[in-house]
Amino acid sequence: MTSKAGWEASLRKFLLGAALLLASTLHALAGDPDPGKWDEVLNEARGETVYFNAWGGAENINAYLEWAGGELQKRYGIKLVHVKLDDTANAVAKVVAEKAAGRNDAGTVDLIWINGENFASMKRQSLLMTPGWAEKLPSWKFVDAVDKPTIRTDFTIPVEGLESPWGMAKLVFFHDSAKIDAAGLPKSAKELLDWAKKNPGRFSYPQPPDFIGSSFLKQALSELVADRAVLQKPVDEASFEEVTAPLFAYLDQLNPLLWRGGKAFPQNYPAMKQLLADGEVDIIFAFNPSEASSAIANGELPGSVRSFTFPDGTLANTHFVAIPYNAAAKAGALVTADFLISPEAQARKQDPKVWGDPTVLAMSKLAPEDKARFEALDLGIATLKPDELGPAIDEPHPSWMERLETEWKRRYGVGN
């Protein structure tokens, strides 16, 4: 016979389960907040805490997000918490684990700085909020989705409004003009190898799977592959070895010529930048055309550093923010995403003294006072003009990055 205490415990357990089921049902009926009803989104967002999972490896970016958080708190009553990542895949893994555990509501990740393979993975596993929200944001009207096609196609994957554009990227190289004559700079991956043979130990790249290091592999592969079109499709294991043979033949020659003989690699871009500042290497690269000017403005690199690129093209892409399907603060995340593409926030982000990240907005769509914000920016002495950046090479399908990283680690990874 069940005791009174046992019966009461069972009743409490039943009522708690029923309450949780009711809350889940009401949330499902309510659906995701609709950016088309912006006043309702703003009302719902007030008082929310948005956990923004974003790379935390650069002080200038961290400072920019701190500023954005202050503005969001002041204007909309939103608290922005920057969850600093060293790898975006860690945030994706959180959402995957929560879905596996049945946590389809009140997730721990509200917004992610994302693109490429991580976006493809979340889209494939249905881990993102309702499609179409990004193009319904009030500030979307300023976005340049015509002349910047990577805003709607992320590493060959259709975006479909599942993520909101935040900034543009183009692979650019840097050197100290006080030490290297511009006439001797390499103009392609093959010329970079020739340069390294003449200057052993004076170049390196971050160890994959660091994003910048993996991007170097993709840049080299895009230049060396027999047919670049194959990179726009998912990796075919049957042909992977044949397709990538030119790349690994190239790396077999290059890696022994790297800084420390290829037996150690910079952890990430800031570490590689420090090597240039310390005079340990002569050429580095980044995915931001304004990075050199920004580093000069912040006292991280000498004023004699200049940018260069390859005349036949370098990789280009857009980076985004995305909202997981189970985010706890979806309304707050929407308001944050909208603020990040506002003319004010985009102009501040493009200032080399702040960050130097190129805008996703179209100048022709801006009001005169907003356009003036951009025109007033001094992009810096080391920033190449748009017509000096060279052609854009399309990013390979996301599956190539993961497969290249795995093979690179097997062949060259430190400790192997």
Image: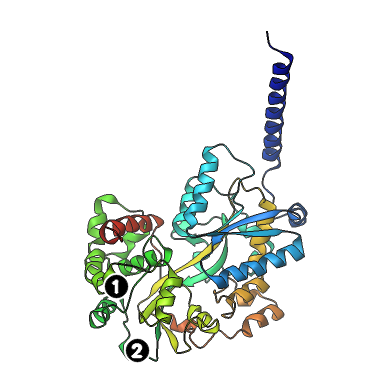
Give the labeled residue for mark 1.
260
Q: Identify the residue at the far top of this view.
A: 1
Direction from residue 302 to residue 188 in the image, left or right: left
Name the residue nearer the viewer: 162 or 209.
Answer: 209
Question: Badge 2: few (under 14), some or many (20 or more) residues near its Cα, within 10 Å?
Answer: few
Q: Earlier in the sequence, mark 1 or mark 2?
A: 2
Tell me if I can see residue 391 in this picture.
no
Q: Residue 281: percent from the left, percent from the top?
A: 35, 79
Nearer to me, 119 or 291:
291
Rendered position, 193 above or below 225: below
Residue at image point 34% right, 60% down: 231
Q: Which mark is residue 180?
A: 2
CB atoms of marks 1 and 2 within 8 Å = no
Vertical comparison of 99 with 146: above or below? above
Quadrant for residue 6, please give it.
top right
Mark 1 residue element: helix
Quarter the N terminus occupies: top right
Three-letter amino acid code at disc 1?
Arg
